[in-house]
Amino acid sequence: MIEIKNVTKIYSTKKKQVVGVDNVSLTIQDGEIFGIIGYSGAGKSSLLRCLNLLERPTSGQVIIDGVDLTTLNNKQLRQARLKIGMIFQHFYLVSSKTVFDNVAFALKAAKKPKEEIEKRVNELLEMVGLSDKRDAYPSQLSGGQKQRVGIARALANDPTVLLCDEATSALDPSTTKSILALLKKINRELGITIVLITHEMEVVKDICDRVAVMQNGKIIELGTVYDIFTNPKEKLTKTFINSVLRFELPDHLLQKRTGTIVKIQFKGKTAEEAIVSDMLQSFKVKGNILHGKIEYIQEMPLGIFVMELTGEPEEIKRAIHYISQRTNGLEVIAHAA
Ligand SMILES: Nc1ncnc2c1ncn2[C@@H]1O[C@H](COP(=O)(O)OP(=O)(O)OP(=O)(O)O)[C@@H](O)[C@H]1O
């Protein structure tokens, strides 16, 4: 378990002081994939780097598996860090070393026997799907392959925690998907806790169990990914969600309509029920679907539909009430002209 208690990181430059992380407290459970999302400058990297003390918090505690890292001496800290792997946006591979030697680096430094290193590196390369590249140099690899080497290297010492610093931000969308799938496999098969920072909600949607939204060094919202997607509270969180769900109706479409336009959100089981057809049968209204889709988040459905309802105002009112009762969200976007 990772416990972050009242962590503040202040950078002091000659001219001024900058607050990178502002009194953050947070607990991350073993085996979770925990996402931290925010725009540039929100404090994500600072917070992530406080977790292995690459940045020393100005105040507060970072407790991993019961050990407060901020109290350790250098030798103890080096030891503790072996259990915290890290991967980076720009990979940071050693260009003069082969894939094998990049992955073997930490094992050699720990003076492990040659046969053990050989066996472990081969296992790791197999796990990340790069067995055939063991003698290649980083310059001969694609971005996705470089990140796979970065992941294998981070796993060499059997860490319990893997920190991912914008690990997919330099990759194209399909390579991103494959790296995220690999991270998920590592999490599920090896039980490694993953903490990742990103500015892309798509990444959060694809693999995270929980997410924290950061702004100005603080965590402004936190929850399971499904709850955050279905019931966001903060404006910034809504902006991130809209970037994934892309649920904007063109103005010209709205202007042509004469009925009442409603946006209905179905979550969990309600996404699978025939609520709309029940409503159309029960009330004297007509429904015209303008837009709709079902997304699967953490393998649970989230359906969003925009409908135009026409009929007598009283019937529309009753139909809206009926749907509001049976779904978890109905918003009237525009009224009859
Ligand atoms: N070494 C440093 N010295 C001074 N200020 C810093 C330093 N590192 C970060 N900061 C400042 O701390 C704040 C948080 O930066 P941080 O890099 O943690 O944000 P971020 O959310 O990770 O952004 P990005 O995605 O752009 O890296 C910013 O205002 C940044 O300018």
Image: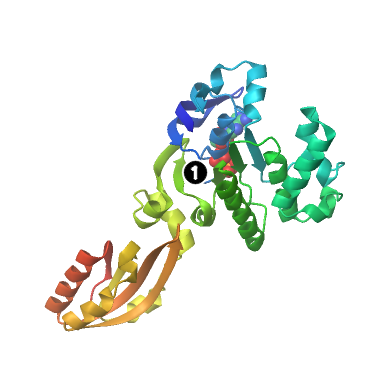
Residue in the picture at 67% in, 56% down: 171
- Rendered view: 112 above or below 294: above
- Rendered view: 232 above or below 300: above
The C terminus sits in image quarter: bottom left
Residue 94 appears in the rendering: no
Q: Nearer the viewer, residue 238 or 329?
A: 329
- Amino acid at circle 1: Glu
Q: Which residue is mark 1?
A: 32
Asked if ligand 1 lies within 8 A of label 1, the reply is no
Q: Secondary structure at mark 1?
A: loop
Name, please, the residue furthest toward the left: 314
Residue in the picture at 45% in, 63% down: 296
* Residue 282 position within the rendered picture, expressed as x and y whole percent measured from the top left: 17, 80
* Residue 136 position within the rendered picture, expressed as x and y whole percent measured from the top left: 86, 51
Q: Quadrant of residue 104?
A: top right
For ligand 1, the image quadrant comes to top right
